[in-house]
Amino acid sequence: MSVLVGKKAPSFSASAVVNGGEIVENFSLDQFIGKKYVVLYFYPADFTFVCPTEILAFQEKIAEFESRNVQVVGVSVDSEFSHWKWLQTPKKEGGIQGVKYPLVADNSMTISENFDVLAGSYDYNDAGQVVFNGTPMAYRGLFLIDKEGVVRHQVVNDMPLGRNIDEAIRMVDTLQFFEENGEVCPAGWNKGDEGLKATQDGIADYLGRH
């Protein structure tokens, strides 16, 4: 598994569904550079079981992300037409109607591959034909990307393991606190807590008060 933290997020351009039903071509994260933070997350597939709980949970917290100047973007290997259909399906029928943030169609699986969350890889069989080994879906990867397009946090779960959306918000808060105050965030830090200065004196002072 590649560690992308500290590196520029891989660039891509792909079709996506935005605003709950509008299909757009050439969707790219480049539009947010210099303007917004991005929480980019991958999920295995449309019309599944754990995935809608996460997708809807992000939507339920979308105001908290927006208040922090964060754009949430979801990605799976499904087509934009599959995304669109799922977005038109009511929740009581297993759909995700009401989700407004972009869902990107990674048809070629290259976005998942470039972020190294694809659950498998391409190879050649004995006949020299290209084959895919593994599961042609993405693991539950999540990447926090700053306004310069650099990955500052990543976490990858196996497919059965749903994520905690509040933890994604907490990581946004820690990054923004560091950027604004120049102080680092100790274990279990939450918004409103004090940070500590990354010096021996600063650490000793913090530990002496806790």
Image (cartoon, grey):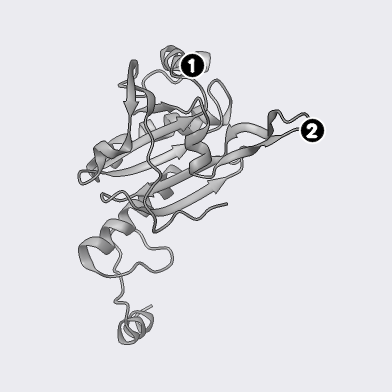
Q: Nearer the viewer, residue 18 or 174?
A: 18
Q: Residue at x 45, y 12 (%)?
A: 85
* Residue 111 located left or right of residue 29: right
Where disc 1 sits, the SS reads helix
Identify the secondary structure beneath mark 2. loop
What residue is pinned by disc 1?
82
Q: Is residue 99 above or below residue 110?
A: above
* Residue to which mark 2 is pinned: 126
Whole-angstrom CA distance, mark 1 to mark 2, is 34 Å
- Tell me if I can see residue 163 in this picture: no
Q: Position of residue 152 (x, y in %)?
A: 38, 55
In the rendered view, tell whether residue 84 sits above or below residue 140.
Answer: above
* Position in image of residue 13 (x %, y %): 37, 31
**Where in the figure is residue 184, as x and y percent of width and height?**
32, 69
Q: Nearer the viewer, mark 1 or mark 2?
A: 2
Task: Say whether residue 45 is left or right of residue 134.
Answer: left
Q: For mark 2, does the 10 Å Cα neighbourhood hold few (<14), some (14 to 19), or many (20 or more) residues? A: few
Residue 67 in which image quadrant: top left
Residues 130 and 91: in front is 130
- Lower sequence index among marks 1 and 2: 1
Three-letter residue code for mark 1: Ser
